[in-house]
Structures are given as C-alpha cells and as structure tokens.
Image: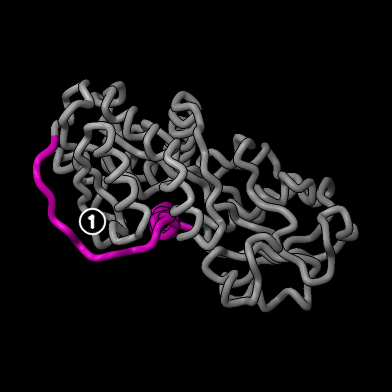
Amino acid sequence: MKKSSLKSAIAALAILPVAALLAGCAGNAGSSSSEDETVKIGVVGASDPYWETYVDAAADEGITVELVDFSDYNQPNPALAEGEVDLNQFQHIIYLADYNEANGQDLVPVGSTAIYPLGLYSSQYDSVEDIPDGANVAVPNDPSNLARALLVLQSADLITLKGGGSAYSTLSEVDEAKSRVKVTELDPTLTATSLPDVAAAIINNDFIVDSGLEASDAIAQDDPSDPNALPYVNIFAARAEDKDNETFKKLVEIYQDTKAVTDGVIEHSGGTAVMLTTPVKDLEASLKTVQEQIAEQG
C-alpha cells in the first residue's frame, strides 16, 4: 500500500468520538503559573460529559479551561501548531507522529490519558492457551488495525513477527515457522461474524457491542505496559516550546488524578478505556521511534 493511503488509514484510527465545532477565545500558553489562567484545549467531542467534570476540576485549581471543539480529526493539530489552542487532547502517538512527519512540525506529548485496547475474542476457547496449534485467527485488514492486531497476537505468544514488529507491520512479517497459529485477514466488519469459523478474531472496538460482545469477553488485548502498545496511548499534545509549561503539567495531573473524570472517560467508552499515567519520557521516545519508522517508509 502507498504511504499516503496508509496514512489515511492511520488518520481514521483517532480514538475519540466526533462532535460539532465550537469556537474559543485566547489563552496563555507561555505562562508557567497555574493561578487565574485560561488555557484553550482543542478536543473532538466536547459534549462528552466527562469534559464538563474536567473543566470544573481545573477551575477548582485556579485554571480556566476553555474547550475548543473540532468537528473532525484533521483540525486540532494545525490549530495547535498555529497557536489557536494551547493544548489538544484527541489522538494517540501514531496519529501525532504521522502529522508531524507530513507537515514538518514538532508537536510533543505532555501527558497520557488512556489506551483503548484492541481485543482478541473467541466463541470456542476461554483462553489463549486453549487455542490449538495451527488454528486460524482472523484479523482486520485495514492497515493501522492490522499492524496493531498482529502485535496483540505476538504479545499473546500466538505469532512471531520478523524483526519484532512495528506499528506498520503487515501479514508478510509473520514468521510462520515460529508462530502457533495461522492468520487470516478479513474486512473489519466481518471479524466478529467470523467467530464460528475461526479459533479467535481481533475485533475493532466499534463492532464489539453490535456483535453482542463486551470488552470483558476478550481473551487477550493490548498490554499497556508493553512497549509495542505505547504508540496507541492517547495523549495531551503541546507545541515543543511549551513542553515544560507547569500549568499544562497541572492540567494533565488533574485529568489523570480526578476520579470523577477518569470514571466518566471509562463510562463513555463502554468500559474499554484503560487510564494511564505513562511517563512523558516514554511517550517522547515512542513518538521518536514511530516518526523514524514513517521516515524509513518514505
């Protein structure tokens, strides 16, 4: 697949739901004080209930948060780069890496929020260990979810990827001689309905509920502690010159540490969100690695 089409597919994997466009006012991105300050945060889905909780929690700490709600995922990063917002929170590291590489930008992660694990489901087996050698496992064939699905299978010790795998792995990288199962690509809409015919299937989160499944039914999923999962961690992003801004660090802490906020995120996700407090240095290292992988493909 051409790099442009791969990037389009990756862009489609931004994590949070879409809402309507809402304009905002000016912020104070350069200040290091969190007292009586207004910060504009670009999001996609400001009507999600937990955002109101977050704004109130920030106000209790003397920070006025003004949400700027964008109607699609192509808008928040350019707005951040151009100074129209001070932070944004809508994307995972892969999406940010793709934007930086495509546009010559250096936006950076300043804190983690959550990961929305991609799960392996089975109607025949209760655990990964029960899946017999040589069985067929289905994965979605859209490029971004395919690579992620293969990494999930590798983490579950069902397959081995040549070179260890990456966010851009394809089926050709499966080392069949070292893998326990055979992998079959299917349209993402068909992986759930394939369960009667395969030992297990990776099912995109969008299709779990419609398939009569729950996230808790997964027999394997992304392990947030696995470095291979880091590119799928959702983040707060800022301009590089603001990466040490104390107010922004405080806003990340408020998001991570306010139980009413995290409970709201989990509830809104249907129980799929796993809240994270990943060290920023790890997020930065992951961003660098993914951007290098993109550059190698070019």
Identify whether 274 is placed above or below 136: above
Indicate the colouring scheme.
one colour
User: In the figure, is residue 171 to the left or right of 132?
Assistant: left
Q: Residue at x 64, y 76 (%)?
A: 212
Q: For the residue marked with disc 1, what is the amino acid?
A: Asp
Q: Is residue 24 visible?
A: yes
In which quadrant will I find the C terminus?
Answer: top left
User: In the figure, is residue 200 to the left or right of 190?
Assistant: right
Q: Magenta residues?
A: 1-27
Q: Residue at x 65, y 66 (%)?
A: 185
Identify whether 232 is placed above or below 287: below
Number of other residues with Cα within 10 Å of mark 1, as a class: few under 14, some 14 to 19, many 20 or more = many
Residue 122 location in percent, x, y? 76, 67
Q: Quadrant of residue 202?
A: bottom right
Q: Main secondary structure of the magenta part?
A: loop
- In front: 2, or 168? 168
- In front: 141, or 194? 194
Q: Residue at x 29, y 32 (%)?
A: 106
Residue 283 location in percent, x, y? 46, 31
Q: Is residue 93 visible?
A: no
Residue 224 on the magenta span: no
- In front: 75, or 25? 25
Residue 193 location in percent, x, y? 67, 78
Q: Which residue is mark 1?
A: 69
User: In the figure, is residue 10 to the left or right of 38?
Assistant: right
Q: Residue at x 25, y 48 (%)?
A: 42
Label 1 secondary element: strand
User: In the figure, is residue 64 to the left or right of 263?
Assistant: left
